Amino acid sequence: MTEAIAATARWQSCAIVEIATRTPAIKSFFLRLSETFDYTAGQHVDVRLTAPNGYVAMRSYSIASAPSDSKVIELAIERLPDGEVSPFFHDVARVGDTIELRGPLGGHFLWPGPSNKPVLLIGAGSGVVPLMAMIRYRKASGEPVPVALSLSSQTWGDVLFRDELLELESSLPDFALALALTREPATRRTDFSRRIDAGMVADVAARLPGSPGCAFVCGSNAFVDIAVDAALALGLEAGAIKTERYGA
C-alpha cells in the first residue's frame, strides 16, 4: 500500500452482520459495506477504532472473501494479547455494531489473473487469509490455473479455514494442499510434522502439473525469508515472488 492510495480511499461505516469462530484464536467478521468497492484477491483494508476520549487505533486486515457482487466482505482477525484492535473485535464487537473501514488497498500482492502457469501459495497461521481469497476466487471464476498451498500451523486445530480447504482439496482436481504442523504429528501422509524448509516447498511445488509461474508468501518475517529462499531455489525469478509480512 502506498500513502497516495491510502489517501484516496474513503472511510465508510460497515455493519457486522455475522461472526464465526474459526480457530481458538481467530474469528471471522462479516462486514456489510455501505459503499461497495471492486477489489482483487490479495488486497486488504484499514480498520479504524475511535475511543470515547478521541484516541484512534488503526490496523490493516486482508480480505478473506473472494471478489464478488456481494456487499459483504470477510475479515479473519487473530486475537493478539497485546493488540489494540484485535481484542476489541474478539471481546467487545457484536453483530449489529458498526466499524469504520477504508479500502481496497494494496497493489502488489494480487492474484495474477488468467494464466497458463501454476501458482504456488505459501502461508503461516493467519497469513493464509489473502491466499484464501485467491483460492476462493480461483474456484468461483473457474480459471484453469493449478494451485498448490503449503500452510504452516501449530496444530490441527489451529489450521485456519481447515474444513473448507480439505473440501476444496477433494473437489478441485487442480488444487493441492499440504499442511505443516509444528507442534504435533501430522496424521495425513501428504502433510508434514516440521517447520517450513526448502525440501518441503520443493515437495509441494512438485504436486503441480508444471513449474509454478509465480509464488505468493504470507507470514512472519522469519517464515517469509525461508519460503522466499526456497522459492528461489525452485528457479523462480525474484520478481515472480510476492510477499506479505506481519509481526515483528
Image (tube, rainbow, N blue to C red):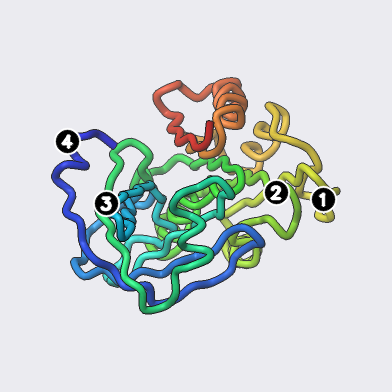
Q: Which residue is mark 2?
A: 179
User: Do labels 3 and 4 touch, CB within 8 Å?
Assistant: no
Question: Residue drawn at (34%, 47%), measured in percent from left and top?
Answer: 113
Quarter the N terminus occupies: top left
Callout 2 environment at 10 Å: few (<14), some (14 to 19), or many (20+)? many
Callout 3 environment at 10 Å: few (<14), some (14 to 19), or many (20+)? many
Q: Is residue 185 above or below residue 222?
A: below
Name the residue type under label 4: Ala
In this view, the residue in front, 4 or 214, is 4
Question: Residue drawn at (19%, 40%), measured in percent from left and top?
Answer: 5
Callout 4 environment at 10 Å: few (<14), some (14 to 19), or many (20+)? few
Question: Residue drawn at (64%, 51%), measured in percent from left and top?
Answer: 177
Determine whether the residue tagged by mark 4 lies in a helix, strand or loop: helix
Q: CA distance from mark 1 to mark 4?
A: 45 Å
Residue 75 rendering spot, x and y as whole percentages: 43, 60
Determine whether the residue tagged by mark 2 lies in a helix, strand or loop: strand
101 relative position to 153: left or right: left
Q: Residue furthest left?
A: 8
Q: Is residue 54 above or below residue 120?
A: below
Task: Choose the circle earlier in sequence order: 2 or 4.
Answer: 4
Task: Choose the circle earlier in sequence order: 1 or 4.
Answer: 4
Residue 31 picture quarter: bottom left
Which is closer to the viewer, label 3 or label 1? 3
User: Do labels 1 and 2 touch, CB within 8 Å?
Assistant: yes
Q: CA distance from mark 3 to mark 1?
A: 37 Å
Q: Which mark is residue 4?
A: 4
Name the residue type under label 1: Ala
